[in-house]
Each structure stands twice: as structure tokens, then as C-alpha cells.
Image (cartoon, rainbow, N blue to C red):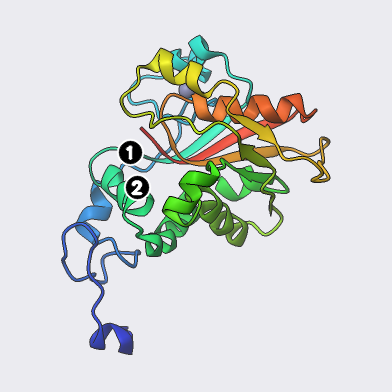
């Protein structure tokens, strides 16, 4: 059924501008664009969530990049690939203030197989922004994603326990090696926050690029005595 408000103010696709038709489960993503999104289905790398296409061997539990990195976190999931339309959506959300896309990302979380189970009774820890960037952007996109995840799985709890103490330059022009060095000790656990080291913590970020940011966050949690650390990202770049 067409909602009354949709007749007065038709919703349009953030990418194509087309009106959103009944073929789309999303608010601001048309059916055509939705079909272009590469949503992750099993099998995937158990450490970063990157999907395997084609033949999968028993030795493929972890992808070559994760094997090389040997991260502090234990396992990881991701919901879609950050390419094409997926890349544009993340860009609008992160850099162009399109916070309304959170509703559609919440839908993507909901459609991701097994995500509820993955989040069950976890402490969700957003990757923090440096205060300068927080002032610039006005919101932390990782915290916003955590809020959507808690609505999806109410047994999970959002706890903003990390802070970013080094204002690292933009990562986009750096090599893989430089990114890793740059991020190494950029994060710390906030003092006096009543940590629960006995519980499983899931670090949440918008995009998995090299894993260095997430690993740096995981290292900070580990230093604070937290043993069971996993990750979740909206997209894998
Ligand atoms: Zn991997």
C-alpha cells in the first residue's frame, strides 16, 4: 500500500533520483540500485567477513590478507562490499551528512543472515572519532550504526568506551604500511568507564579497508584486559 506521505512527498533514490517503488525494501535506495549492492552471503572469511566467490577450500577459513595481518580480534562480519552503489551510499552517509540512510543500513543489517546471533549479548564498541573530526562532522557514524544494531538485537549493548587520542591525517593517500603505522597507538580505553572484561566485545565501524583501524582499537581493548574481541563493519572496501 502506498503511504499517504509518499503521495505528498514521494521518496527518491539517493543515487539515481528515481522514485522508490514497491520493488525496494528500502526508504532511499531504489530497487534497481538495491539489486546492484553486493550483500555478503556465506561463505566468507571468518576474520574479516570478506566473501569468497567460487570454490572454497577447508583452508579458507581466513583470507590471505587476514592471515598476513594476524589481527588481535578473533572473528569478523561485514554486510556488503564497498564498491559501486555500496561505495556511494557509504560516502553520502559519512561525508555528506546523509544520516537518513541509517534507516536503510538498519534494513541491510536486518537482511544479513545470522547477524542477530552474532550480536547476541555483545558489548558494541564504536570506533571513535578524534574530537576535532567529531566537531567537524557533528556525529560519529560508527555510533549511529551501533544504535541501529542495538535496535536489531536488544540483548546487545552500546558502550562508547574508546577514545581517539591521536588526530591521524586522512588515510586515503597513505599506503597500506603507512596506515598500519599511523593507527597503531591512536586509540585508548576511556578512564573510569566500568569495563566488563568478561564479556564479548564487538568493535563496529562503517568500512573495513585494511583492518588497521579495527586492529588498533582491538589492541586498546586488549591492553585494558578484554579477551574476547570481534569486529563488525557495514561494508568491506
Ligand atoms: Zn579476511
SS of the residue under disc 2: helix
What element does badge 1 sit on? Answer: loop
Asked whether 227 or 187 is in front, the reply is 187
Report whether the residue tagged 1 is closer than 8 Å to ligand 1: no
Residue 139 in view, yes or no: yes
For discs 1 and 2, the disc positioned in front in the rendered view? 2
What label does residue 82 carry, if any?
1
Residues tagged 1 and 2 counted as in contact (Cβ below 8 A): yes
In which quadrant of the rendered view does residue 40 lie?
top left
- Which one is nearer the viewer's eye here, 160 or 168? 168
Looking at the image, is 199 positioned above or below residue 96? above
Name the residue beneath numbered marker 2.
Answer: 90
For image coordinates 30% across by 25% down, the residue present is: 173
Q: Which mark is residue 33?
A: none
Q: Position of residue 60 (x, y in %)?
A: 48, 16
- Identified at 64% across, 46% down, the residue is 119
Q: Is residue 64 left or right of residue 89?
A: right
Amino acid at each position: 500500500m502506498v503511504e499517504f506521505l509518499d503521495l505528498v512527498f514521494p521518496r527518491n533514490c539517493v543515487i539515481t533520483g528515481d522514485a522508490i517503488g514497491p520493488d525496494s525494501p528500502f526508504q532511499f535506495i531504489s530497487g534497481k540500485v538495491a539489486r546492484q549492492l553486493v550483500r555478503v552471503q556465506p561463505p566468507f572469511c571468518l576474520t574479516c567477513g570478506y566473501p569468497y566467490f567460487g570454490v572454497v577450500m577447508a583452508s579458507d577459513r581466513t583470507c590471505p590478507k587476514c592471515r598476513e595481518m594476524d589481527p588481535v580480534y578473533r572473528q569478523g562480519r561485514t554486510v556488503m562490499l564497498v564498491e559501486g552503489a555500496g561505495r556511494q551510499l557509504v560516502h553520502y552517509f559519512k561525508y555528506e551528512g546523509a544520516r537518513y540512510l541509517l534507516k536503510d543500513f538498519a534494513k541491510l543489517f536486518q537482511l544479513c543472515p545470522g547477524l542477530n546471533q552474532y550480536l547476541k549479548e555483545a558489548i558494541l564498541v564504536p570506533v571513535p572519532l578524534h574530537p576535532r573530526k567529531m566537531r567537524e562532522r557533528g556525529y560519529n557514524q560508527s555510533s549511529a550504526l551501533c544504535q541501529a544494531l542495538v535496535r536489531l538485537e536488544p540483548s546487545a549493548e552500546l558502550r562508547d568506551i574508546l577514545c581517539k587520542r591521536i588526530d591521524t591525517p586522512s588515510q586515503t593517500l597513505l599506503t597500506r604500511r603507512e596506515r598500519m603505522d599511523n593507527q597503531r597507538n591512536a586509540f585508548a580505553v576511556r578512564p573510569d568507564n566500568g569495563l566488563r572484561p568478561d564479556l564479548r566485545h564487538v568493535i563496529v565501524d562503517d568500512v573495513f579497508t585494511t583492518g588497521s583501524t579495527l586492529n588498533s582499537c582491538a589492541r586498546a581493548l586488549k591492553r585494558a584486559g578484554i579477551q574476547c574481541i570481534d569486529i563488525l563493519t557495514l561494508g568491506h572496501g
